[in-house]
Image (cartoon, rainbow, N blue to C red):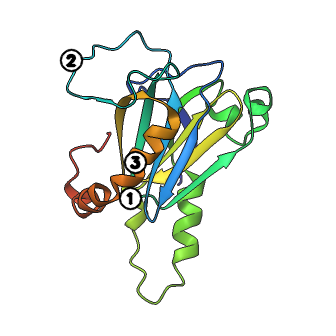
Amino acid sequence: MTSEETAHKYDLGLDWSTGAPDPQVLSYRNRASIVVHTQEPTPDLTDPSLRILDADDEHADLLGVIQLYGVHAIKIGGPNEEALRGHPLADKGLTWMGNYRVLNSSWITEAEQINSVHSNHQPGWHDRLTHYVFAFHDETVECLVKAIRIERYLGTPGAVLIDLIGRKKIWDEVEASVAGNPYDHP
């Protein structure tokens, strides 16, 4: 007997702007980053976990980055907040803007079924994936991933994206350790 698919609010430790988070997705192979404007208080500039770029730029802002590792699939687009009640998970816990973790995901089951025709398919690989839904003001991002990590930046979205592109080598190193990843969210 299969349990019903449900969406549950999930605390990432990141509060994005509800009015204009303007998510921007950067994807490379099986990694991706979602850059968003936050509504968090003014950052402590001495915090070593804060990456500071363009601090003197008048357009610098506190930005959050949701790092996605072991990405199997990612999609960005509708619905926006006004149409969220039309999402297939709307009657299963997805109620409003925010972060959600989907249990018993039909998308993961579908991905496993699609992959089952591969000659080297090994059942159960999908058990290591988690389905997340990030419902923003104007769009929704959904992903099937192995792990996530949050980063904070002070800078412009463009500077952050350039920094992330430059860190591709770091992504390659992190990818190699995804199996025993300290960033896995339970």
Compared with 64, 123 (above or below) is below
Residue 81, located in which quarter of the rendered image?
Answer: top right
The amino acid sitting under disc 3 is Leu
Q: Residue at the location (51% across, 51% down)?
A: 26
Residue 94, located in which quarter of the rendered image?
Answer: top right
Q: Earlier in the sequence, mark 2 or mark 3?
A: 2
Residue ID for mark 3: 164
Foreground: disc 1 or disc 3:
3
CA gap between label 1 and label 2 equals 31 Å
Look at the numbered disc 3 and give the secondary structure of its residue: helix
Q: Earlier in the sequence, mark 1 or mark 3?
A: 1
Foreground: disc 1 or disc 2:
2
Q: Earlier in the sequence, mark 1 or mark 2?
A: 2
What percent of the width, then of the height, locates residue 104? 51, 48
* Residue 4 visible somewhere in the drawing: no
- Closer to the camera, 76 or 59? 59
Q: Residues within 10 Å of mark 1 (few under 14, many from 20)?
A: many
Residues marked 2 and 3 touching at CB (< 8 Å): no
Q: Residue at the location (69% across, 36% down)?
A: 139
Compared with 26, 28 (above or below) is below
Residue ID for mark 1: 70
The amino acid sitting under disc 2 is Thr
The amino acid sitting under disc 1 is Gly
CA gap between label 1 and label 3 equals 16 Å
With 186 as the anchor, is 130 left or right in this view? right
What percent of the width, then of the height, locates residue 126? 43, 62
* Residue 55 visible somewhere in the drawing: yes
